[in-house]
């Protein structure tokens, strides 16, 4: 469904700015309170804190008095609690779903932390603590948006669903089932995911693409049993020799993927200096970068292929033998506009075409993850306009090189919905690493952005 959004109401910009100025300290206190709860969903970890976190979040959502229902719902398998708060849209108005997750990564090596991970501390303009940025600031951002709707709009027309997942950091094992089972509770015209971030500290970004994933196992066989290399070496091909020749054909001399049939997207035009990539990756001095085109586009918009495992005798078990059979696993990141099934076929075709000496190929297990590419719609315009006002700077379209399986799942299960990926992280937020922190000015701007999206959605109707 499309909605009649044209431009942001200027009154809303001023009103949300004032609201944030007045309420930011209390939102920060709520964030600190949530970061103190070590809400891990890890299977062998005590789940009490995760339940405590779910209870507290559902209480905070209830206290807004915006929602008709606030429920804690168990996922089927591992028993992790999600929270769904819902208020139904008036006829003709959009239903907006705000997504974040309340489970966190483990703290990791405590010696590397300069603060206590679960005793959050503000240092300069950052709040340090595990989960501060990923994704508890996302949770509080949604809570604030609901409160803004209540405080600043006389009539609430828009529908609002807040969905806080409890198992994102363990790979959302029940997500697909959960969406299916709770379809009616979750149905929405617009889904706003707050679990990504900005490209630079001061530059807002809408994450508009994610690469997909195709991984495949295969084996190469040349002999019916291993042979003495002194007797047959130089006459009979061994499986590893065939495999290495094949793997070498996956990339050209620049290190770009050389498999026909994989798609790539046009350049973003966003330039980053090579030094930035060198610093972030820790690539050794004298080692060259690979690929062609814009540096960011190589990981956002182009495919990549990595050999991630080979079964052949290890060096310590090696002998002077021609191996009969070698097993290998390769993993490809595919461009946001590509399709996992056709990319898989392209990889298989390439493997079959590049096996030398008539060796036998056998394909094994396959893993497919769909990419994501945002539509250009009323919703992307609304989000970018809101960001431009809150940050005072135009938002850029950002890609993410990895896949976020639950985003693809949202798109798959709700194909009619607009899905927007935003977030509160910045390049120095260090999600998943020691010294994770939330940049507070970004938190403030994200709250205003989400408030603007929701309040403007309260004033638009279906076309
Ligand atoms: Zn996250």
Image: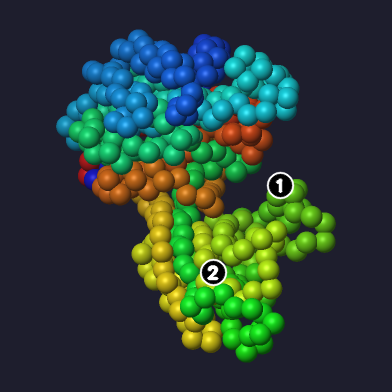
Q: Residue at x 37, y 26 (%)?
A: 80
Q: Residue furthest right?
A: 285
Q: Position of residue 240 (x, y in %)?
A: 60, 73
Question: Image height check: is 246 above or below 178?
Answer: below
Which residue occupies the foreground of this view, 367 or 278? 367
Q: Position of residue 325 (x, y in %)?
A: 52, 72
- Position of 318 with respect to 43 (left or right) is right
Which residue occupies the foreground of this view, 103 or 58? 103
Residue under pointer 1: 280
Mark whose residue sits in front, 2 or 1? 2
For label 2, the crowd category at 10 Å Cα-Cα, with few meaning under 14, some 14 to 19 and many 20 or more, is many
Q: Is mark 1 within 8 Å of ligand 1?
A: no
Do the residues bearing badges 2 and 1 touch, measured as CB atoms within 8 Å?
no
Question: Image height check: is 89 above or below 209?
Answer: above
Picture quarter with the C terminus: top left
For label 1, the crowd category at 10 Å Cα-Cα, with few meaning under 14, some 14 to 19 and many 20 or more, is few
Task: Tell me the element at label 1.
Answer: helix
Label for residue 326?
Answer: 2
Q: Residue at x 26, y 33 (%)?
A: 186
Q: Quadrant of residue 394?
A: top right
Q: Residue at x 66, y 17 (%)?
A: 116
Q: Earlier in the sequence, mark 2 or mark 1?
A: 1
Question: Image height check: is 236 above or below 394?
Answer: below
Which residue occupies the foreground of this view, 407 or 153? 407
- Position of 281 with respect to 208 (left or right) is right
Picture quarter with the N terminus: top left
Q: Can you see residue 406?
A: yes
């Amino acid at each position: 469904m499309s909605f009649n959004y044209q431009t942001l109401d200027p009154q809303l910009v001023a009103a949300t700015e004032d609201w944030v100025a007045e309420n930011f300290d209390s939102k920060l206190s709520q964030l600190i309170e949530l970061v103190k709860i070590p809400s891990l969903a890890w299977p062998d970890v005590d789940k009490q804190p995760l339940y405590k976190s779910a209870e507290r979040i559902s209480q905070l959502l209830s206290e807004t008095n915006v929602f008709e229902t606030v429920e804690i719902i168990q996922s089927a398998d591992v028993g992790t609690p999600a929270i769904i708060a819902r208020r139904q849209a008036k006829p003709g108005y959009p239903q907006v779903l705000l997504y974040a997750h309340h489970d966190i990564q483990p703290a990791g090596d405590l010696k590397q932390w300069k603060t206590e991970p679960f005793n959050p501390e503000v240092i300069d303009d950052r709040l340090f603590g595990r989960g501060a940025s990923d994704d508890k600031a996302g949770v509080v951002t949604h809570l604030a948006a609901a409160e803004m709707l209540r405080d600043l709009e006389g009539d609430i027309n828009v529908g609002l669903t807040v969905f806080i997942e409890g198992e994102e950091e363990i790979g959302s094992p029940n997500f697909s089932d959960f969406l299916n089972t709770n379809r009616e509770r979750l149905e929405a015209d617009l889904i706003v995911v707050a679990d990504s971030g900005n490209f630079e500290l001061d530059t807002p970004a809408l994450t508009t693409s994610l690469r997909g994933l195709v991984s495949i196992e295969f084996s190469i066989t040349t002999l019916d049993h291993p042979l003495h290399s002194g007797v047959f070496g130089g006459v009979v091909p061994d499986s590893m020799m065939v495999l290495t020749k094949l793997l070498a054909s996956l990339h050209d001399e620049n290190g770009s993927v050389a498999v026909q049939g994989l798609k790539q997207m046009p350049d973003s035009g966003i330039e980053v200096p090579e030094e930035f990539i060198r610093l972030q990756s820790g690539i050794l001095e004298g080692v060259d970068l690979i690929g062609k085109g814009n540096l960011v586009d190589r990981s956002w918009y182009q495919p990549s292929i990595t050999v991630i495992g080979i079964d052949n005798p290890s060096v310590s078990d090696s002998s002077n033998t021609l191996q009969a059979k070698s097993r290998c696993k390769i993993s490809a990141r595919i461009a946001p506009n590509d399709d996992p099934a056709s990319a898989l076929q392209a990889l298989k075709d390439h493997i079959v075409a590049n096996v030398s000496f008539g060796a036998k190929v056998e394909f094994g297990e396959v893993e497919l993850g769909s990419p994501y590419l945002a539509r250009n719609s009323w919703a992307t315009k609304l989000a970018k306009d809101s960001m431009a006002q809150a940050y005072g700077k135009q938002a850029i379209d950002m890609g993410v090189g990895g896949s976020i399986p639950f985003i693809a799942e949202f798109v798959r299960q709700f194909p009619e919905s607009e899905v927007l990926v935003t977030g509160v992280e910045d390049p120095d937020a260090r999600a998943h690493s020691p010294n994770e922190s939330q940049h507070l000015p970004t938190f403030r701007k994200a709250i205003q952005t989400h408030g603007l999206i929701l309040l403007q959605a309260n004033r638009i109707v279906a076309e």
